[in-house]
Image (cartoon, helix red, strand yellow):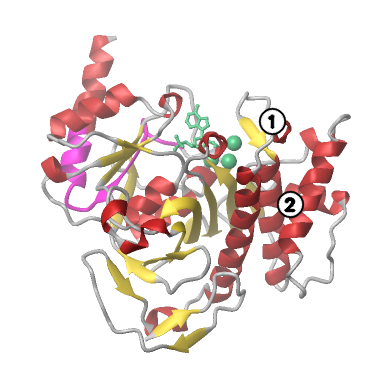
Amino acid sequence: MYITLSCLRATTIVVPTLIPKTKTSTFSLITSSSLSMSTYHKELAAAKKAACLAARLCQKVQKSLLQSDVQAKLDKSPVTVADYGSQAVVSFVLEHELSAEPFSLVAEEDSGDLRKDGSQETLDRITMLVNDTLANENAYSALPLSAENVLTAIDKGISEGGPVGRHWVLDPIDGTKGFLRGDQYAIALALLDRGRVVLGVLACPNLSLASIGMQTQQSSASQIGCLFSAVIGEGTFMQSLDGSSPVKVNVSAIENPEEASFFESFEAAHSLHDLTSSIAKKLGVKAPPVRIDSQAKYGALSRGDGAIYLRFPHAGYREKIWDHAAGSIVVTEAGGLVTDAAGNPLDFSKGKYLDLYHGIVATNQKLMPSLLKAIQESIDEKASSL
Ligand SMILES: Nc1ncnc2c1ncn2[C@@H]1O[C@H](COP(=O)(O)O)[C@@H](O)[C@H]1OP(=O)(O)O
Ligand SMILES: [Mg+2]
Ligand SMILES: [Mg+2]
Ligand SMILES: [Mg+2]
């Protein structure tokens, strides 16, 4: 039996332990074979390190959130010093850990607003946060970073992705509204190789290690902060953000929709709650929806907290790859399926956006056929009532 010492080590170190082999319905301890010869071993270690450091920065900001830390982007969505700081940290760490490889990053934020007059104070605060977060990383001779270095690191995220070569895909804070409310958010990082997601890491600083809804019964109730990671063909693992041993997770095995519970966005503006409630009713789902922010939903689904995730954005909204790349591999490697509303797999090879039929659906293989049927009926009914 082996455990990973810490998610902050770029090169994952595994040591023998005396932990007995235990298994629950959804978790099992990591095995040596699943860690040894991964094609993306180096990339996984770098991604975990980058996401853990970025999570540390975000946690610090969430604890002392000042109004001046929040700005509105052109599309009116909020962006905080933590979104920029997280992007700078992940970009800097990936590029330095994987310096032998060409570096391409598709990321949500850019430095445009930070380069405008009147942004110096905000930029100085971001630069300080980034340097504080990286302060213990003695291996980086480029430290401390100047404000210009931070802007450059943020702007590395300018790649368009696509079907050729490798591209990292980053949402530095997914669920900024949840972050501002003190609720769920995620640092979501994935690697595309020839248009396919081959690796994903989701850091969820406010997600309990215990299942949602079970916190009161479990001893790990007070442990908050999860790191999910998945490499293609190797399964999905969860560990605490401060570096506990990874456990393999699996999606729910529920076959009867009446016993299923489903996740959806906390924000009604992000998903049509009336459509999802019609779908749930058709399926016979009894439990009310679990509404949480961000790709933490994919993480929770991957360990069987709920059985279904439904996301139907309002007409005209185009989903971006950084909002689903990491989450989708975390769910598929845990045995689940992630498709659009017609059952098509998500295509991450088309650049920054996903072309979708209506929305995104994630569940286990048993529930998917009846779920897709209920979805189509609900979409047709909605269309005929307009
Ligand atoms: N109008 C919108 N419709 C759907 N999703 C949105 C909308 N505005 C922002 N988002 C993105 O939805 C995701 C969070 O949604 P949810 O928490 O509902 O799952 C985030 O990626 C958020 O971006 P951001 O990364 O800027 O927070
Ligand atoms: Mg945003
Ligand atoms: Mg997002
Ligand atoms: Mg974001």
Residue drawn at 84 percent across, 44 percent down: 124
Residue 370 included in the magenta stretch of the image: yes
Residue 268 position in % (x across, y down): 41, 25
| Residue farthest top in this picture | 386
Residue designated by label 2: 156
Please determine whether, in this image, residue 118 is positioned above or below residue 362. Answer: above
Left or right, 175 with reference to 356: right
Residue 161 seen in the figure: no
Specify the segment rendered in magenta: 355-374
Q: How many marks?
A: 2
Residue 127 visible from this viewpoint: yes
Q: Is residue 57 magenta?
A: no
Q: Is mark 2 within 8 Å of ligand 4?
A: no
The numbered dot on residue 4 is: none
Picture quadrant where residue 78 is located: top right
Residue tagged 1? 67
- Please tell me which residue is depicted at 29% across the width and 9% down the height of the picture: 386
Instruction: Indicate the position of residue 301 as horizontal and vertical percent values.
Output: 32, 51
* Residue 91, image quadrant: bottom right
Quarter of the image containing the N terminus? bottom left
Quarter of the rendering containing residue 302: bottom left
Q: Amino acid at mark 2?
A: Lys
Note whether 17 is above or below 287 in the view shown. Answer: below
Q: Residues within 10 Å of mark 2 (few under 14, many from 20)?
A: many
Give the vertical position of 18 relative to 365 (above or below).
below
Which residue sits at x=36%, y=57%?
A: 221
Marks 1 and 2, the one that precedes in the sequence: 1
Give how far apart the Cα atoms at labels 1 and 2 are.
27 Å
**Residue at image point 74% right, 48% down:** 154
